[in-house]
Amino acid sequence: GKNEYDLLVIGGGSGGLACAKEAAQFGRKVAVLDYVEPSPQGTTWGLGGTCVNVGCIPKKLMHQAALLGSALKDAQHYGWNISQPVHHTWSVMAQGVQNYVKSLNWGHRVQLQDKKVKYFNVKGSFSDPHTVRGLTKAGKETVVTADNIVIATGGRPKYPTHIAGALEYGITSDDLFWLKESPGKTLPSFILYVSLECAGFLTGIGLDTTVMMRSIPLRGFDQASHISKKKQICFTTQQQMASLVTEHMESYGTKFLKRCLPTKVEKLKSNRLQVTWKNADLNREENDSFDTVMWAVGRVPDTKTLNLEAVGVKTNSETGKIIVDATEATSVPHIYAVGDITEGRPELTPTAIAAGKLLAQRLFGQSSELMDYDNVPTTVFTPLEYGCVGLSEEAAVQCHGSDNIEVYHAYYKPLEFTVAERDATQCYVKMVCLREREQRILGLHFIGPNAGEVIQGFALGIKCGATYSQLMKTVGIHPTSAEEVTKLHITKRSGLDATVTGC
Amino acid sequence: RGYPEFVRTAQSYHGRPIFALFCGDKDAEGRSWCPDCVTAEPVVRKELHNLPDESVFIYCLVGDRAYWKDPNNEFRRSLKLTGVPTLLKYGTPQKLVEEECFKAELVRMLFTED
């Protein structure tokens, strides 16, 4: 054809790279553009996108650092002679994490080169539906033409610019993982899983951390009210999973400023930051000083500089995300989009990767398989992890009606917590099922250690249409926390006490 | 040749970018016991003209086969080498291992990338 490439991918993250590498497997001529606009604080990083550089990977590693801190505390009960308190050095952890991330950046470079995918470190913008103009950091221009274009530029953290001082003095997750020095006394604000996860590991490594929240934690995750004594089932949109997770964090030292809204951030002579906020409950203004203020108020799609208007790619007016159909096609023929940039899709790495691969297979491999976004399992890596797959209680009720669903639940205590004398009050599992006949499982929610590992296997069961009856025939592995799922028998409807006693 | 000499040499060039190729020892005829090293060496040498200015290229023989096979040898322990040949940019996670060293474009990329 007249175009230089069969496929041009704008954005070298999870979705973009997966799509490009898959297309290259079919012997196609592929190019990838990747460019990281430095954060307001000047942080930048290499190839691989959000997950690799400022998301899942460094997050999970730092979460692990915090868990190891807890394990050291537990170790004494198991006979280890470790002098307390144990101290943590941020720079050692940061260097280890950052080195690993850099090795991933390099690994992607090698893979692209090996698969003959052309890589440009340029910021792309559309000139016409088959032409993209790329600018290097130095301002040098490259023009690339392609038969098919995939937009996979992802998102970046939002800054609450209406709050004075927010932009100049605050950081976001973009910066947190690349800090060379400890963030010290930190205020991650507001509530999204990002701020809970970060607050969780910061507390875990011994830093004084406060989370400021305007309203409810983890909006969008399962929030059905927990009222175990009543005979009736109540599903108002209150915190359940969310509050269990934050309750646990609170008991381990993370401070929460609930129903507070920051009004300004100022720099003090000591170089610390003073944050002023309105406390809605006490109806007064309060302030405190911190070493670091981190904003986690949402992510926005990275479309500003793409020049989408010039080619007519439609975006959602509210979110700014690119509108795609079930084939990941945008409103413009031959232009597609995958990953965080797309409207209505989960902001997750595995879904972006799968969508990118399937898209390449449909474009170049004679496949017609579409991405299945149903029953995607996820996990929030707070100190006590929350993993889930399928419907939340409210979604199930909305879909089927409260009379047609049955919710099983249990509070349990992981065996490892016993000797370590750890509080397990928030360890909880909930399964949402259809009420009739075999009771097909609609959703599973698990709070406890290794929640991600626990949920992964059950995701397959739900994909296959597993029922509560089948679950009851599934023998548990003993002693594990996962087996608590196979032992579920108390329903919310019964109003009985859902606490599990020993075996 | 050998780990202590490598470290001394690298330290003497502190401040400059250092690229190093690690290969198995060569016999009297100049052939290495490591067949992959035999393949990789000419490929790497051919790309040396792409080295950035001011940089240093160190060619290091790690030892005989028995030494290399020991999982606790100094190169494995301190430099985290997993195989020979290894071509790396000292002090960074950027490296090429074994068959990756056969590919001229990868070698060129290692030498010229930021």
Image (cartoon, helix red, strand yellow):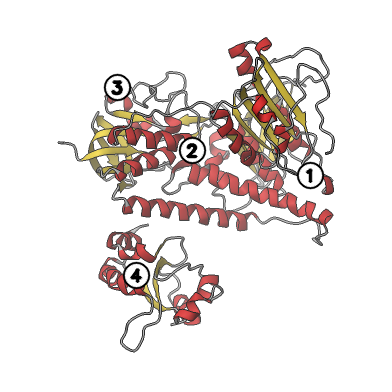
Q: Tell me the SS state at disc 4.
A: loop
In this rendered view, identify the residue nearer to me: A282 or A10.
A10
Disc marking residue A349: 2
Q: Tell me the SS state at disc 2.
A: helix
Q: Amino acid at mark 4?
A: Glu
- Residue A202, can we see it? yes
Of label 3 and label 2, which has the lower sequence position? 3
Q: Amino acid at mark 2?
A: Thr
Would you place residue A312 above or below residue A19 in this image? above
Residue bearing the label numbered 4: B54
Q: Residue at x 28, y 69 (%)?
A: B43
Q: Quadrant of residue A231?
A: top right
Q: Amino acid at mark 3?
A: Gly
Where's residue B78, x and y in %?
A: 54, 71
Discs 3 and 2 share one subunit: yes
Residue bearing the label numbered 3: A312
Give the Cα distance between marks 3 and 2. Answer: 27 Å
Q: Tell me the SS state at disc 3.
A: loop
Give the Cα distance between marks 4 and 1. Answer: 59 Å
Where's residue A9, x and y in %?
A: 32, 38
Residue bearing the label numbered 1: A415
Q: Residue at x 24, y 31 (%)?
A: A127
Give the Cα distance between marks 2 and 4. Answer: 40 Å
A119 lies left or right of A93: left
Residue with the most extreme bottom position: B28
Give the Cα distance between marks 2 and 1. Answer: 32 Å
Q: Tell me the SS state at disc 1.
A: helix
A39 lies left or right of A143: right
